[in-house]
Amino acid sequence: MSSTPDTFAPRSAAPTSVSFIGLGAMGHHMAKHLVGSFDTVMVYNRNFDKATAHAAEFGTQAVSLEQAVSADVIFSCLPTSQVVDDLIEQALPHLNAGSVWVDCTSGVPENAKASQAKLNAAGCEFLDAPVSGQTSGADSGTLTVMVGGSAKALAYAKSAIDCFAGLIVHVGDSGAGFAVKAVNNTLFAINAWAAVEGLSVLKAHGVNPSDALACINKASGQSFATLVTLPDRIVNQTYPKTFTIDLMAKDCGIAIDLQTEKQVPTPVMAQVASLVRAASNQYEPGSADFSEFAKFYQLMSGIILKDNH
């Protein structure tokens, strides 16, 4: 990520108006934390009923896209960079110079650079600021936010990001936030896939999965997947739909594109990314939780990771 001059000039000493575009599983919770910290908190969603429901529940203002992008700090949290790009094109005539667009989508680094260029031409800034922590972290306001882009723009928008964040790290120039998020999600997929394989081996030898996890989670084999994903989604066979498997496959694909660009050998990342894509292909986009990769592995192994107790 090459360094670029940081010449951002904010429109005011501190933001007084904020907006949130995209009220899905994450955005719904993230936007509520903005209420009470700013004079104006606006929300927009393509399905406008979600915006009006959010306003009724949390005291935000349901507005048009044109109104939403007039804010000092504009958040977006959408499925893909392409959706964000389309909205930016619509928004350009309505932006106020000196505002900051903070995109919390798990996006493509090259798209972040293109969005930054478009917003710079309008006198604004674009921060790629994807989040990690799942819906529980969004609900509690403890998300990890990895930010790429202008340090001055981040300083201006930080009071708004703080509302839903437990940790904010400026990881580099435009695109760096998206890059870190893609690799993070791929590392999670590796841990989760390996944990399902390992527990399946143990179950084949008569070990109850929950008993195995009780040991692993106090030992060196633990990960977020063994601590949270397997007990809360897979071993109990609930698979609640939050972050979907097609989006996880997309993020793994972004990580592999980064690897290819710099010719870094990543055989484990590439293998798991391919397996996650194969699992995702079993479902219609948006229909299955990311944890349902375990059902695909179940077809391969013939072993159901269900608690025996």
Image: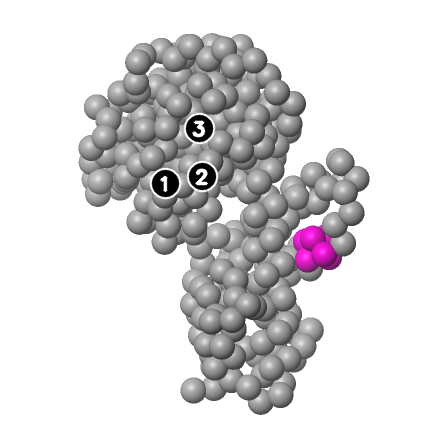
Q: How is the image coloured?
A: one colour
- Give the position of the N terminus as an image quadrant: top right
Q: Are marks 2 and 1 in contact (CB under 8 Å)?
A: yes
Q: Main secondary structure of the magenta part?
A: helix
Earlier-in-chain disc, 1 versus 3: 3
Left or right, 37 with reference to 127:
left
The picture quadrant where one finds residue 183 is top right
From which residue to which does the magenta span run?
A: 268-274
How many numbered badges does the structure rendering display?
3
Question: Could one spot residue 228 in this view of the protein?
Answer: yes
Residue at 39 percent of width and 23 percent of height: 155
CA distance separating discs 2 and 1? 7 Å
Is disc 1 surrounded by few (<14), some (14 to 19) or many (20+) residues within 10 Å?
Answer: many
Residue 293 position, x and y percent, is: 59, 63
Residue at 58 percent of width and 83 percent of height: 203
The picture quadrant where one finds residue 27 is top left
Name the mark on residue 232.
Answer: none
Mark 1 highlights which residue?
Answer: 165
The picture quadrant where one finds residue 280 is bottom right
Mark 2 highlights which residue?
Answer: 145
